[in-house]
Image (cartoon, rainbow, N blue to C red):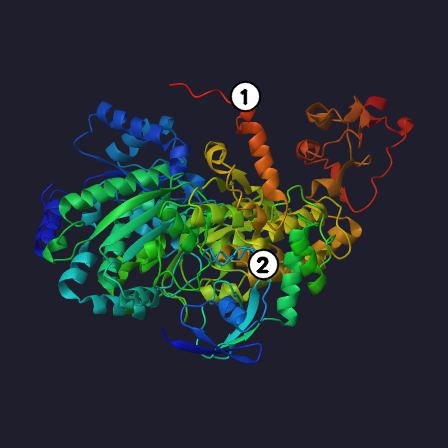
Amino acid sequence: MSEILLQIDGKEVRAKEGMTLLEAAQEVEISIPTLCHHEKLEPYGGCRLCTVEVESRGWTRLVVACVYPVEKNLVVRTRSEKVDRIRKMILQLLLAHAPDAFDLQDLAQEYGADKDRFEKEASFCIHCGLCVRYCAEVKKKNAVGFVDRGIRKEISFIPEIASKECWNCKECFPLCPTEALQAAFVLTKALAFPSPSFEPASEE
Amino acid sequence: MPRINSPAELEELRKGILSKRDPNKPCITLCSGSACNASSSGEVATAIEEEIKKQGLSDSVDIRRTGCHGFCERGPIIVIHPEEICYFNIEPKDVPELISETIKEKRVVERLLYTDPSTNEKIIHESEIPFYKYQERIVFGSNSTIDPKSIDDYLAIGGYSALAKALSGMTSEQVLGEVKKANLRGRGGGGFPAGSKWEGSRNAPGEIKYVIVNADEGDPGAYMDRSLLEGNPHAVLEGLTIGAYAVGSHEGYIYVRQEYPLAVENVFTAIKQAEEYGLLGKNILGSGFDFTVKVHQGAGAFVCGESTALMTALEGRAGEPRPKYIRSNIVGLWGRPSVLNNVETWANVPLIINKGADWFTQFGTDTSKGTKIFSLVGKITNTGLVEVPMGTPLRDIIFKIGGGIPGGKKFKAVQTGGPSGGCIPEELLDLPVGFDELTKAGSMMGSGGMIVMDEDTCMVDVARYFLDFLTDESCGKCVPCREGMRQMLKILTNITQGKGKEGDIELLEELSETAIEAALCALGKSSPNPFLSTLKYFRDEYEAHVKEKRCPALSCKELIAYHIDPSKCQACMMCLKKCPAEAIDGGKNRISVIDQEKCTKCGTCFEVCPPKFRAVTKISGEPVPPPIPEEARTIVRESKQK
């Protein structure tokens, strides 16, 4: 694979073709905040927190670093007034859901995001999709999925699959940046999993 | 059906069809598009068939059920050929007279004709009616003359001759060149040059390529793609096949929403007929070119009109846009080069090939060529589909063709481009319609929705309405769209309910920036447009709502009150009798008074108060005058005093 030379925050960076801006930045220890990114998963581009400014052929625009592929001579700025303003707004929107999530609190401090900018929402879930995608892409079980769309979209365990697969896995739990996943699991368990003491003995 | 193996055989077949048709034989065409079907066009058709049999005319008159004629306000529509006598709002009971008079006696039935509202004159011929006169119906015109379920009808008007010309007389480069030269821009939203899109796919690596028809028209009030697909499906198929030839694709898809049952039915019929004639399938017209088309019925999601979401849905997954920064004409459906154009764009292609790019480019402006079909709806006299050359001023579309605003109301704004478009105010009415002109005005062409609003429309409420639509239709994948719109809708709802706060407008602007700059797809990026364009031209209305708790259009329920002017009320008791909330007190010779506590602001009193009194008024931003004292409520009528 050919090497691509680009500039990130003033640093000359050598990247391999096919890499994303996020990967190229991580190689040279430039940190870009992310919420929905996971190295084992396909880029998702959902949280948009990794929005950065790119300049090529005299044209500046905002792209998400977790998806955008490295390009020759690209000039990338991971922080700018505009980038910071957008990250701050994204964080404020998410803090309406999960004001106590540690990941969000740390980022809120860095970007000056006010957790009370918007009225609190009922669900903790910030729709990063880590649990859903991890279960589908890594575990290949699809025990947890998204249901509905838009503002009604939520994560939900599929009881038929979850009751078989989730007891001994739970690998998605530590991925969740908020408490929403455990809550969904507990709910599914209460409603649909057969309690061990009442489990009917398998017959025939 | 015989298979057609060459362009010569196609011409033979065409001649055969035409030789069996007598152009002077009376033919009744009846609009049977979805809109007219809803106003009982089906019953009218049955009545015509029965009446013709009854009057013994079965052999001397043809009946043809066509697609949408466009003048939906006046449907069902009948046009009698060859004289082109045009009748509107036909009911089954009109049929016997229509047949005996016009078909038998060759006399016009005056009462069924169109009356020009400005001159009060009756107009006989379709082409003389203002609604049609100022249009240029090069794409949509065939709709009213052919039966969409009959491929022979399409062949009779020269159908598939463009395909024959392309396959037998032109190289694929030449076809591409002609479309590029015509500067055909996508009619679905973005206005991207179709030729460049095709060229990208053509040059992209890979053996397998796809061409796709986007018939997932989802803008509220827009139905031009539906009507084209319902009324002239072969034109779309022909355009698609020509495109496939230019791109080097052998497989096409029609992504059509299943809420369009007639379009789905007609397109299936059309594909079957074209396959039987060999106009689709292997070795089309003996050229060696193979092309098949499949239909995919979408479940009706606005976001699936977005190219990558549509392709994801075609692949059988939830219709969510892809995060990729690579155009879908290079990496599209199943990762292969895929050309996606909407129904109207494809329907333009046969015209360009048949008549040439030079003919096509005579219509339009420097940067927008050809014509555009608009769906003219809202507070407009002539609701319907209109096709005009690009560059036609908005004023001509709304007033000359659309007949202006009904009820003597004043024009306020026109919303173009669907939910992601914007509102254009009166001072810009002379704007010529074109892709770049509309974008410059803060709106967009979109797929051609045009919603006219009068002085009673609150622009803040319009923004709220569209945000509500978009919030519902967002796929929910990215934060700026899902969460941003959730908050924008909340703030706008608050403003229209009188709960707006200082700083709300600025917060909406901040949220807009985040969506424009950081949302994943075009739907998200354009979601703040309804707010931004209304703010741009109607900022005073926003400020009145927030600062004075006043709705200048007297439309927002929470901000208005109904009041009966005691000096005007004549105690006719109309309002009192009709009030569903029993909120009006009054009686014989007693001035009516509205109990503001009970009033639900339904507006019934305002509507039923006789125009000669006009005693009921709407008030906003000021306190309701206290009820008139009991002793002053009695009306003493002079005549009764004597």
Q: Label 2's element?
A: helix
Q: Are marks 1 and 2 on the same chain?
A: no
Is B431 situated above or below B504? Answer: below
Q: Please rate how many residues cluster around mark 1, counting C-alpha atoms within 10 Å: few if below 14, some from 14 to 19, many from 20.
A: few
Q: Is residue B43 left or right of residue A199?
A: left
- Return the residue at label 2: B515
On-image quarter of the C terminus of chain B: top right
- Return the residue at label 1: A198
Q: Is residue B23 left or right of residue B349?
A: left
Q: Is residue A185 left or right of residue B88?
A: right
Please give the chain letter of the residue carrying mark 1.
A
Q: Nearer the viewer, residue B490 or B4?
A: B490
Name the mark on residue B491: none
Image x and y of residue A106, in percent:
69, 59
Kind of residue at disc 2: Ala
Residue B526 figure quarter: bottom right
Q: Nearer the viewer, residue B460 or B135?
A: B460
Q: Nearer the viewer, residue B264 or B211?
A: B211
Q: Is residue B72 left or right of residue B242?
A: right
Kind of residue at disc 1: Phe
Residue B331 figure quarter: bottom left
Residue appearing at x 53%, y 26% in the figure = A194
Residue appearing at x 74%, y 51% in the figure = B545
Image x and y of residue A61, in percent:
53, 70
Residue B573 figure quarter: top right
Residue appearing at x 42%, y 62% in the figure = B191
Residue appearing at x 70%, y 40% in the figure = B557
Image x and y of residue A146, in percent:
51, 42
